[in-house]
Structure formats: structure tokens, C-alpha cells
Image (spheres, rainbow, N blue to C red):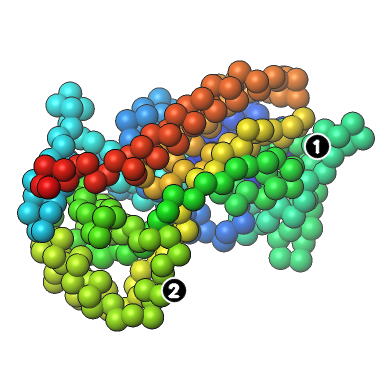
Amino acid sequence: MKVDVCVVGAGPSGTLLAYLLAKKDISVLLIERSENIGKFFRGEHVNEDGEAILKKHHLFDGVEELGLLRMEHIEYWHNGELFKTIEPDPAIGHLSMHVPQANLLTAILNEAQKLPNFQLWLNTAVSDLVQDESGRYMAVKTKHGEEVQVVEADLIVGADGRYSTVRKKAGLDTVTRKHDFDLLWARIPAPANWSPSIKNASIDGLQLAVYSQANDFIQIGWNIKEGSYPKLHKEPISPFIDKLIEAFPELEETVRNNIQSWHDFVLLDVFSSFSEEWGKEGLLCIGDAVHTMTPTGGYGLNCALKDADMLADILHKEKISQIDFTNFITERKKEAKKLLASQIEMEQTFLENFAVLS
């Protein structure tokens, strides 16, 4: 099989890129190892940059029809009391938006699948990359069940996330940084009259955040000390839950009804990573594959969407194999480094938001 571009990974950046290229009459194959799109929970907050990209490509209305939720304020709480609120710019009217990843991907794919030169393979893994005699990457080996197939492409794009197979197979170095905390996620129904917001509290010097979600849910993101979960998991959960309720008393009923054990939490190994080398001849990586970000600030999703948007702008069907990606990589690396530094600063200065109480 031969296509102009093979995109590996049907997350937000890979799906958006595949759609934008297919619109430019470039033949695209999008490969996803999962059986269903949006199967794994990732960052789901779209900020002003992400919103602008969706509107630029006339995708926003489709996303909104499937469901999203605009955040009305950010709050800081201490001992069950609200003491600081951040309001949106009146000209915009909201802060970030919660967009379920399945809704985002479905809205893009609904448009992509109308195009004759777009293909999506689900439940298909990339097992290896193929180089020609000159060393240029020219194909991917895929496996779907027992079926093995080689797909040739003028360009291979790795948009396959923080554990990118494409990055590893191409030998692109990456530097990983730990952030001294891990993250526990839990999803529970929102109580009645819960306003769309992001609420923050400090528990034992670490951040506890409660994010409103579309469809009347709340996502709890609780920072814990790095590596502490195995010990924590052996202890009773009730004192842990009591701290959550003390921070946000309004959540008592829904928390006690929906969080019964440690199994109701999902543990996220928090790290960031950055690759100085984003590609080789015939191959390029974008998104989390080359700049994994932590959940802090919700930058990762939006930075990945911007990668796809800018990459699609410079790709043209007639000269895919001759395009110089130097300027694209330089510009995107500069922004990614800036955002990674901003995340570290936000994590290190989080407690300053509570200085007024000391």
C-alpha cells in the first residue's frame, strides 16, 4: 500500500493533522492501535489557542454539538472556604472549555471520513519502520490481529503520544523529567447547581483540583508525593476521603456515594519529556511524542493541536518528500520549551496562591 502521508496515532494532533492534509488532496492513512477512539483519558481542556484552531478549520460547531462545557471561573479554597476567584476576560466570556476527547475526535473524524483520500485503521499497531538504501524512512510495518502489512509513505508522522513507538523506532533521543508528584484521578457526578469551574485547594502542601466536566460530571485531580501510592494503597481510604470533603464540603454526598475504595481512583505517572531531535529523513514526530507535558495548566492538548495546524500549513502534495521542516521544528520547539518552563513555575509557586492565609 502507498500513501502520501502515514500518521501514527489517532489522538487530537494526529487526527487533526490527517484531516487537514486530506482536505489538501493529500492521501492520508491514520493508524490507531486502540479499537476505539478516545479510549484513554488524557487532557481534555481546550484553551483559547485550541478554540481558535477549531474555529479556524470550521470544526468548533461540530464539537459543540457533541458536547462541551465552558469554564466560568477558577477558584481557590482553604478549609472549605472560598478566598480567591479568577474571572474570564469579559470580551471572551469564559476560561478554558472541557471537551471530552471522544467528542473532539469524533467531530474531526466526521468531517475527515467524508474525504475520499482519508483512511483510518483502528486496532492496528506499528511494529517497525522501514528505511530505503539511503537511510530515508519510507514505510511502516503494521499488525492487525495476525495480518501484517507494509505501508509506504512519502512522510511518516509519529503522533503516538508519550510512549511513542515511532520515536523509539527512529532512535530520537528524549530527556525525561520527574516532577516530584504523581496524580490520582477520579470521576464522579456533579452535585446539583454546581457551577462550571476549576476549584483548587492545598492538601498537605500539594494541589487538589476539581474540574467541572460536560454531562454533569466532576474530575478530581489529586497530587500525591511521587512513589507514595503503593504505601497509600495499603492504608484505609476514609482519612483520605475526609480530607477531600474538608476541602470541598459541597462534594460530601457525591464523594461518599461514588468513591468507596482506592480502585475508584486511577493513578497517573506524572512526567514531562522533551526531544531535541524531532525527525529524520522521511519522518517527523509531533505532540506528546516529542514534548510530553504534565496536566498542569492544561497546555499539552492545545500545544499538540497547534503542532498539527502549523505542520498542515507547510505540507503540499507536490513536494512532500522535499520539504525542509527546520523552521517548523525551531518554532514549535521554542513554544514547547516555554510552556514546559511555565508548568514547572506554576507547580513550584502553587502554594503562593495561599500566602494570603499564612
Q: Name which residue lies at 74% across and 32% down.
A: 280
Depicted 302 relative to depicted 224: above or below = above
Q: Quadrant of residue 249?
A: bottom left
Viewer-closest of 249 and 12: 249
Viewer-closest of 184 and 284: 184
| Residue type of the residue flagged with mark 1 | Met
Q: Position of residue 60 (x, y in %)?
A: 35, 35
| Residue type of the residue flagged with mark 2 | Pro
Quote the CA–CA distance across marks 2 and 1: 44 Å
Q: Which mark is residue 138?
A: 1
Q: Name which residue lies at 69% across and 19% down.
A: 324
Q: Position of residue 299 (x, y in %)?
A: 40, 38
Depicted 260 relative to depicted 101: above or below = below
Q: Quadrant of residue 45?
A: top left
**Tags 2 and 1 touching, CB below 8 Å:** no
Viewer-closest of 283 and 142: 283
Q: Earlier in the sequence, mark 2 or mark 1?
A: 1
